[in-house]
Amino acid sequence: MAANGASLRSLLGTGRAGPLWELFFRFGPPRWSNYIRSHWAGQRLVISVPYLWLLLFFLAPFLIVLKISFAEFAPLGRPPFESILRWSEEGALQIKLLFTSYSYLLHEPLYVSAWLYSLKVAAVSTVLCLIVAYPMAYAIARASPASRYVLLMLIILPFWTSFLLRVYAWIGLLKTDGVINNVLMGLGIIDAPLAMMNTSFAVYVGIVYSYLPFMILPLYANLEKHDLTLLEAAQDLGSGPVRSFFSITLPLSLPGIVAGSLLVFIPAVGEYVIPTLLGSTDQLMIATLLSDEFFRNRDWPRASAVAIAMLLLLVVPIMIFQHFQNRELKGNKR
Amino acid sequence: MKIRRFLTFPNVALALGLAFLYAPIIVMIVYSFNNSRLVTVWDAANSPTLRWYVALFQDRPVLQAAWLSIRVAAMSATGAVILGTLAGLVLARFGPFRGRALLRGLATAPLVMPEVITGLSMLLLFVSLEQLLRVLLGWQFDRGMLTIMLAHITFTMAYVTVVVQSRLASFDDSLEEAALDLGARPARVFFQITLPLIMPAIMSGWLLAFTLSWDDVVVSQFVAGPGANTLPMLIYSKVRLGVNPSVNALATLMVLIVATGVIVAAVMMKRAERRREREMRMADAGG
Amino acid sequence: MVERRYDKNKFEPWRDPAAKPYVSIDRVTKKFGDFVAVNNVSLKIYQGEIFCLLGGSGCGKSTLLRMLAGFEAPSGGSICLDGQDLADTPPYERPINMMFQSYALFPHMSVEKNIAFGLKQEKLPRGEIASRVEEILGIVRLTEFARRMPHQLSGGQRQRVALARALVKRPKLLLLDEPLGALDRKLREHTQFELINIQEQLGVTFIVVTHDQEEAMTLASRIGVMNRGEIVQIGTPTEIYEFPTSKFVADFIGSVNMFEGRLVEDLPDRVRIQSDELGGVIHVDHGISAAPGAVVWAAIRPEKIDIRRTPPGSMAENCVRGVVKEIAYMGDMSVYLVKIDSGKTVRVTLPNIERLSDDERIVWDETVYLTWHPGSPVVVTQ
C-alpha cells in the first residue's frame, strides 16, 4: 500500500500544478478528491478512459488535419494528397511541408472575401441577437417565479426541436411567394414582393433565430442573480430608471453578455447549414467554401488549411469562453 | 392601469421575441395540412388534409432513415453519457493531476467547435484509420453507422461532461467521504452515492446528447459512408431542392413529439420540486 | 455542569500515570506543499473521554480530525487507536466514524437507509441490521421518522440522524466536526446535554472539533486549544479558563484584560508586577516561573474585577482609577468599559443581582475605582 501510494504520487507528481494545488489548499482542508488522488489505484483507469477517447477522436484528428494541410494535392490519388513523409531512394525519411494551401488562402480574393463576410455575418448576428435577447432575458428575470419557469420553458423548447427544420421553416416565410410577402401584399403594405430569400438578411434572421436561446439563457442566469435593492438604492439616490439601467444593471450583466455573445459568435463564424439554405450563392461563408473544396474539388489539403486557419481565428474567443465557463463552475461551488 | 403597468418595454419585447420564435413553427404546422403541392398557396377548398402525413408513412427511405437516426442517436447518447460522466467525474472530483488542463480543454472544446471542422477532422481520422487497418491487419471497414456514432459520441460527450461536472460541483463531497467513513470502498461509493445523486444530470445529458445526435446533419454528412443516410441528411437533401409539403408534415410530427415530451417532463419536475419544497417547509415548522 | 460530573466521579484518567491512552497521536505533522497545516502534534486521549479540539479557522483542527478519519495521510508521526497503528488502514476499514459538519446525510435515502448504510457495508445479516437500526433510532428519539427523507427533517432531527448513523457502527472512536454549528441557539443548548447523555449511555470516546468555546466548555472532559497547527494548551475546561498558560489561550477563551509589565518581586508564594499599561503594581498571591525583571503579562477576567465609586483604603496595589466610557446592559449582567488613567480601556462585567434605582446605578463619565483579589490575575510569559 505504501509503495503503491508512493509510486502513484511520483507518477502524478505535483508538477506544474504544484503551486496552484498549495494555493488552493490554503483556503480550507482538502477533501474527498484528495483521498482519491493519493489512495485509490483505480483512479488511473477512470481518468484514462475518457482521456484516451478524446485523444484519439478529438486531438488526433486535428493533428491529421494539420498534417494534410501541408501535403500536396494529388487530384487523381486515393486519398487525394501525397503524404508529407516519404522514404527517399537512399532510405532516409524525408518530410515535405508545402505552404501552397495556406498562401492560396491569403492571396485568393474569393477566400479573403469569404473570411471577411463570415466575420461580418457573425458579428452582425451577435449584435442583433443581443439586442433581441437582452430585453427578453430582462423581462423573464423580473417576472414572477411561476411565470418565469413557464417562460424559460418556452425559450428552451425550440432548442429541443430540430435545428434543421426550424431553419427550413424560414424558407416558407421568406420566399418571394412566401407567407410574409403574401401577408404584406394582402394588407396592401407593399406592391411587389420583397426579395428576402438568398440574401444576407435571411442569413441574419436564420442565425438570430437559431441561436437566440444561447444568448437569452446566460443573460437570464446573470440578470436573475442581481440584487434588486441596488436599483432601489440608485432610485433612492435620485437616479431615474433609464439611468439606473445604464449605470448599474448593464455593467453588472457584462459577464452574461460576454458569455452569450461568444456562444453565438463562435459557431456563427463556422455556420454551414443556415447560409447554404437561406443565403445567396454569390457571397459564400467560409464553412461553405471548406465543404465545397472538400466535396466538390476533392482538394483535401486546401480544405484542411481552411479548417486550421478557421481554428486559429477562433482560438482566442474559444479560450475566453472556456475561461468564463470554468469561472462559472467554480462559482457554483463557492 | 394594470395593463399599462404590464406593458413595459421588456415585456413587449418578450412577447414579440416569443412570437418570433414560434411563428415559423406555427406556419409550418399549419401548412402541413395544406392540400396544395405549392407549399405557399393555401388550397382552401381541400384543406385541411392529412395527405402529406399518409405519404410520409408510405415513404420507405424516410422511414429507414428515421430508424437509422433513432438507433444512432440512442447509442451515441449512451456512449456519450458513459464517457462524459467519467470525464465530468474526473474533472470535478479527482483534484489536480498531470494533464488535467488538457483534459478540461479537450472535454469542453467541442461545445464551441464549428461543425464543419469537427466533421472534416473526424472524416480524415477515419480515412487514416481505414488505411492503417488495411495495411496492418488487412481488415477492411466501411464508413457508415459506426463512424457516425463514433463522431456523435465525441462531440456530444462534451455536453454531458459539462452537465455532470456542474452537478457534481453543486453538491458537497463530504457525502462521498461519509460513505467512505461508513465502510464503503471507493468503487462502491461511486455506485451507491455519487451515481444516484448525479442521475438527474446524467438523464438530462442523455436527452441532450440524443437530441444533438438526432439533429446533426453537418458532421454526419462528412463521416457517413455512401450507404448510411440519417434522417437529417435526407431532410437536408430534400430541403436544398426547395420547400416540400411532406417535410412540413415530418417537421410537425417531430415538433409535436418533442414538445409533448419536454412539457410532460417539465411539469413532472416542477411538481416534484413543489412537493419537496412543501415538505421542507413542514419539517422546519415541525421543529 | 460538566465540571460537576467529572469532579464527582473523579473521571480523570489523564492524571493517572498508569492509565493507558486509548488514542495516541504521536508527533503528527501534515504539510500541503510548503504549508504546514498540523505541526508536530502529540496527544493522548483516554477511553470514555469527550476531547475537544478548539481553535479558530485554519488552525489545523479539521486536518487533524481528517487524519484520524483516514482522509489524509500524515506527513510525519503516527496515530494509534487502542494499541493499533492506523497508518495503513484506509478510512473504510477504520473502527472510527465521523459526524460531518454538514451532516452529509445521503439525500436519496430515507433515515432508516442512511443509518443502515454503514451496517450493510459490514455485510451483517438483515435481521441484525434492522434491530440495530431500531435500537439506535430509539436512543436518538427518531423512531417515528424512520421512513422520512432527509429533506423532510428539521435541522435538529438531521443532526440526530447523522449522530445515529455514525454510532450504529459501534465505533471505537467518534469524530464530531462542529456538531452543533448548524443549529440555532436554543436548540444547541438542549442538544449539547443530549450528546453528553448519549455518550455516557454508550461509552464511546468522542473527539469534537469546534471553534465555539462555549460548546467546548460544556461538552468536553478536556480541551486541546490549537493555534497555527500546534496544540498550545491541553486541560479541563476549568484549567483552560482559569489558568491559561499563554496570552493566546487567555485571549482566545472568554474575554480578558491583559496588562504588560515587568516582574519586580519574585517570591515562591507571591509576585509583584510593575505595569505601565496599568499605571500601577499588580500583586499576585502565587508564584510563577520567570526571572525577576522579565517582561510578563497579567491577565484578569472582566468578571473578576470589582467596580466601585469610592476609593479603597489603599491605592498601592491591585487598584486603578478610571472613567466609565460605555455601559452595555445585557439583562443578566452589565458590561462596563472603563478608561483608566494610563489611557487603556478595561472591560468589567457585573451581574445584575439587584434591581437598582437610577441614582444607585453607575453612569457614563463617572469616575470609578477598579479592584481585584490577588488570586485573580493569571501571569503568562508568552
Image: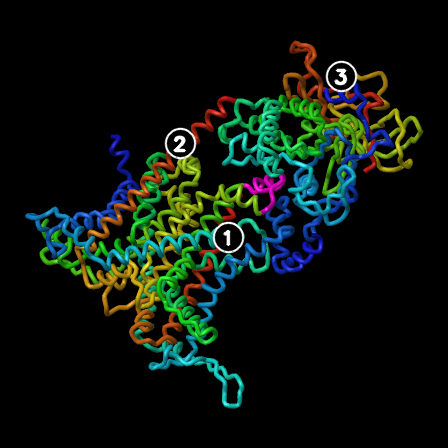
> For the point 26% across and 49% down, which residue is it?
B254
SS category of the residue bearing label 1: helix
Q: Chain of mark 2?
A: B
The quarter of the picture where residue C13 lies is top right
> For the point 84% across and 27% down, which residue is it?
C282
The quarter of the picture where residue A248 lies is top left
Image disc number at residue A54: none
Q: Is residue C33 left or right of residue B106?
A: right
Circles 1 and 3 in contact, beta carbons < 8 Å: no
Disc 1 marks which amino acid?
Leu
Q: Position of residue B222 (x, y in %)?
A: 34, 66
Q: Residue at label 1? A: B86
Number of numbered discs on residues = 3
In this picture, which residue range is highlighted in magenta? B172-186
Report the mark closest to the observer, 1 or 3.
1
Q: Chain of mark 3?
A: C
Disc 2 marks which amino acid?
Arg
Disc 1 packing (10 Å; few <14; some 14–19; many ≥20): many
Q: Is residue C314 above or below residue B161?
A: above
Disc 3 marks which amino acid?
Arg
Q: Residue at label 3? A: C308
Q: Is residue A105 left or right of residue B106?
A: left
Camera-nearest residue between A117 and B247: B247
> For the point 66% across and 36% down, which residue is it?
C97
The quarter of the picture where residue B152 lies is bottom left
Q: Residue at label 2? A: B274
Circles 3 and 2 in contact, beta carbons < 8 Å: no
Circles 2 and 1 in contact, beta carbons < 8 Å: no
Marks 2/1: CA distance? Answer: 31 Å
Tell me the quarter of the image containing the N terminus of chain B: top left
Q: Main secondary structure of the magenta part?
A: helix
Q: Position of residue C10 (x, y in %)?
A: 81, 22
